[in-house]
Image (spheres, rainbow, N blue to C red):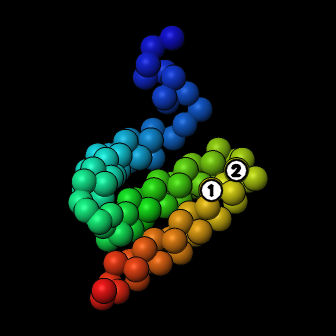
Amino acid sequence: MKLSDRFFKNRVKPIVITQFILIIPMIVFIFLSFTTYPVNFFYSGFVQIILAISMFLTGIEQYILKKKGWSISFFTISVFLILVAVQSFYVSTLKR
């Protein structure tokens, strides 16, 4: 079994490619978040937003593939991640 078959089997290819493209900035923001001292919550918020977008795309993909339970789960996880990201942005704006 080829590697491309493993990633694209029973998946919607444009959504998977978009998720792979989103991994690059997420890795950069994770690196920036952990290399700054103290931990920069602004970058952490970006990581959470990118992860929420990826989860939302997975929810759309599961909806297209007629898996209603999984799609609802991914949609709710993405909403919770957006709420956590908003809190991270709020914490990053607080003056010390």
Crowdedness near tag 2: few (<14), some (14–19) or many (≥20) residues, C-alpha within 10 Å:
some
Q: Are marks 1 and 2 in contact (CB under 8 Å)?
A: yes
For the C terminus, the image quarter is bottom left
Residue position marked by numbered label 2 in the rendering: 70
Real-space CA distance between mark 1 and mark 2, rounded to the nearest whole angstrom: 6 Å
86 or 68: nearer the eye?
86
The reply, left or right, for residue 31 in relation to residue 83 is left
Residue at horizontal 70 percent and vertical 50 percent from the top: 70
> Quick one: SS at disc 2?
helix
The reply, left or right, for residue 67 in relation to residue 45 is right
72 or 77: nearer the eye?
77
Amino acid under label 2? Trp
Residue at horizontal 31 percent and vertical 47 percent from the top: 27
Residue at far top of view: 1
Q: Which mark is residue 17?
A: none
Percent coordinates x, y for residue 54 in the rendering: 47, 54
Amino acid under label 1? Phe
Judge whether 80 appears above or below 94 on screen: above
> Quick one: SS at disc 1?
helix
Q: Is residue 29 visible?
A: no
Q: Is residue 10 visible?
A: yes
**Count of picture labels:** 2
Crowdedness near tag 1: few (<14), some (14–19) or many (≥20) residues, C-alpha within 10 Å:
many
Residue at horizontal 69 percent and vertical 57 percent from the top: 73
Residue at horizontal 37 percent and vertical 63 percent from the top: 44
Percent coordinates x, y for residue 17 in the rendering: 38, 41
Q: Which mark is residue 74?
A: 1
Residue at far bottom of view: 95
Percent coordinates x, y for residue 43 in the rendering: 31, 64
Percent coordinates x, y for residue 37 in the rendering: 25, 62
